[in-house]
Image (cartoon, helix red, strand yellow):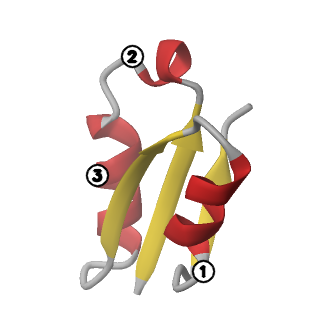
Amino acid sequence: MKIVISDYEDTLNRNLDYEINLIKAAFPICDVVIHVFKDNNSLIKEVKDADDMLPLW
C-alpha cells in the first residue's frame, strides 16, 4: 500500500512524524511518501500507483 502526503514546500516544512506514525499504526505495511508539490505532472506521476493521497492544501 502506498499513501502520498502532498503539499507545497513551505507547508511541508514541519515535523511530519506524527502523521506518518498515525498512518503506520493503522496500516503497518504501507509506504508513506512525502511529495513536494511543484506541478501537476510530477504529482500525477507520484500518485498514479498510490492507494490514497492526503492533499494538505
What residue sits right under mark 3 in the picture? 21
Crowd rating for badge 2 (residues with CA inside 10 Å; few <14, some 14–19, many 20+): few
Crowd rating for badge 1 (residues with CA inside 10 Å; few <14, some 14–19, many 20+): few
- Residue 8, quarter of picture: top right
Which residue occupies 66% across, 42% down?
Answer: 39
From mark 1 to mark 2, how far is it between C-alphas?
A: 24 Å
Kind of residue at badge 3: Asn
Question: Mark 1: which secondary structure?
Answer: loop
Quadrant where the N terminus is found in the figure? bottom left
From the viewer's perspective, tell me whether residue 17 is left or right of residue 22.
Answer: left
Where in the figure is residue 6, as x and y percent of width and height?
A: 56, 45
Kind of residue at badge 2: Asn
Q: Return the residue nearer the eye: 50 or 42.
A: 42
Is residue 34 depicted above or below 3 in this figure? above
Kind of residue at badge 1: Lys
Where in the figure is residue 57, as x and y percent of width and height?
A: 74, 31
Which residue occupies 40% across, 62% down?
Answer: 23
Q: Earlier in the sequence, mark 1 or mark 2?
A: 2
Labelled disc at residue 48:
1
What residue sits right under mark 2 in the picture? 13
